Image (cartoon, grey):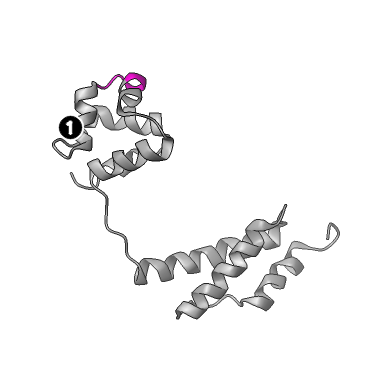
Amino acid sequence: MGTRKASETYFEPAKCFPLRPIRSERDLDRAQATIDDLIDRARLDAGEDDYLDVLSDLVEKYEEKHYPMGHASDSAMLKHLIEAKEVTQRAVALATGIPVSTICEIVAGKRQVSRANIGKLAKYFQVSPAVFTFDK
């Protein structure tokens, strides 16, 4: 495959799933299977990477319309991040310099994340600060 042009390899996945708007669950399933196939490959050339990028955008557009996601509260987001990182509230407090009592109150839904603490939590969990700004 090393000698083929990227423009040639771009069209190979399009034979399985031509790029067009996704209009049904069946289309979505086929698009996802094509994405999975591309992601499972060891390396993608420029053509395959371009195709994957465009197909992912089409899937995202369909899912945003048919499966809109609500915004998570500060409490739900912090709980999720703590669970995903498999740490304790105390560990978060120690790493961020935020008092344990504040972390506990946020998790319990009794307090929102302050502007001062958004940056600390975002840096610790390596996420965008925007994840904590939806219910302000």
Query: In the image, 1: left or right of 46?
Result: right
Q: Please tell me which residue is depicted at 61% across the width and 76% down the height of the picture.
A: 17
Q: Please tell me which residue is depicted at 22% across the width and 32% down the height of the picture.
A: 115
Q: Is residue 97 above or below residue 73?
A: above
The image quarter containing residue 50 is: bottom right
The image quarter containing residue 128 is: top left
Camera-nearest residue between 61 and 31: 31
x, y (%) of residue 123? 39, 30
The majority secondary structure of the magenta stretch comes to: helix
Residue segment shown in magenta: 94-98
Helix, strand, or loop for circle 1?
A: helix
Mark 1 Cα shell of 10 Å, populated few (<14), some (14-19), many (≥20)? some
x, y (%) of residue 21? 49, 77
What residue type is disc 1 on? Glu
* Residue sticking out furthest to the left: 110
Q: Quadrant of the C terminus?
A: top left
For label 1, the residue is: 105
Camera-nearest residue between 47 and 24: 24
Query: In the image, 74: left or right of 18?
Result: left
The image quarter containing residue 3 is: bottom right
Give the mark count: 1
Q: Quadrant of the N terminus?
A: bottom right
Asked whether residue 87 is drawn in magenta, I would say no
x, y (%) of residue 26? 50, 80
